[in-house]
């Protein structure tokens, strides 16, 4: 039997681990100066695995952690990740049968939307992110990297949700 408190603890452990990996390892691995956003990826994974409410809750927590790493306004990342996690959960609910390819596609599109949403919110608050000539390069690289990395993160998200590492996802 999976209790809500054990699910919250597992999501907290996963978020803490991803945060440490993002700060200590992934931020140093950049392709053309761009690295994947693992915290955004966790928000997307929560939406894929747990639905819209779980995606929003985990997205908010992941976004707050992301705000700690950035110099912008506190809460912008949290708002963006909340919206992305919720939207992914809604999109996943409309998919009849999820496959690896569908999960990768949803993750890539959601990652792109998350980066553009963050840039737009930051622009509204006085930043110059939408006019950055590298924005579309960042969108493309983050989308592709997160789309590929979702295959490794989704089993961890299923574990955090209490579904086990090899639940019935992808027709298995």
Image: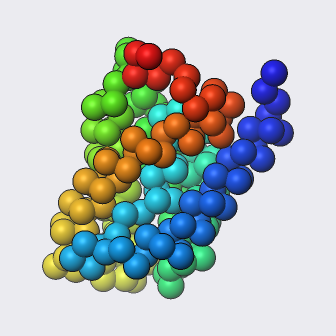
53 shown above or below 14? above
What colouring style does the render use?
rainbow
Q: Is residue 83 visible?
A: no
Q: On the picture, is 140 further left or further right than 171?
A: left
Q: Position of residue 172 (x, y in %)?
A: 44, 16
Residue 43 location in percent, x, y?
52, 49
Count of marks placed on residues: 0
Q: Is residue 114 above or below residue 9?
A: below
Residue 10 picture location, percent across and down: 72, 45
Going by the image, does 79 lie left or right of 111?
right
Q: Position of residue 36 (x, y in %)?
A: 37, 63
Which residue is rendered at x = 48% and y = 39% of the image? 154
Q: Image quadrant of residue 21? A: bottom right
User: In the depicted view, which residue is nearer to us: 69 or 154?
Assistant: 154
What residue do we see at 57% from left, 40% from top? 157
Q: Nearer the viewer, residue 106 or 118?
A: 106
Instruction: Please say if 94 is above or below 101.
Output: above
Q: Quadrant of residue 61?
A: bottom right
Q: Residue at x 31, y 47 (%)?
A: 147
Report the front residue among 106 and 127: 106
Residue 23 seen anywhere in this rendered image of the structure: yes
Q: Quadrant of the N terminus?
A: top right
Q: Where 99 sits versus 40, above or below?
A: above
Identify the residue at image location x=60%, y=76%. 68
């Amino acid at each position: 039997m999976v209790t809500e408190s054990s699910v919250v603890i597992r999501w907290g452990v996963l978020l803490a681990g991803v945060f440490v990996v993002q700060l200590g390892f992934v931020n140093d691995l950049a392709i053309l100066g761009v690295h994947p956003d693992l915290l955004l990826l966790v928000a997307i994974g929560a939406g894929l695995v747990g639905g819209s409410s779980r995606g929003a809750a985990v997205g908010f927590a992941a976004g707050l952690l992301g705000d700690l790493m950035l110099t912008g306004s506190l809460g912008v990342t949290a708002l963006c990740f909340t919206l992305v996690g919720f939207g992914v959960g809604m999109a996943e609910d409309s998919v009849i049968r999820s496959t690896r390819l569908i999960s990768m596609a949803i993750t890539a599109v959601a990652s792109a939307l998350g980066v553009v949403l963050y840039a737009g919110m930051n622009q509204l608050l006085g930043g110059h992110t939408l006019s950055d000539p590298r924005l579309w390069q960042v969108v493309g690289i983050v989308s592709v990297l997160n789309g590929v990395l979702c295959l490794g993160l989704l089993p961890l998200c299923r574990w955090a949700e209490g579904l086990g590492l090899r639940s019935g996802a992808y027709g298995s």
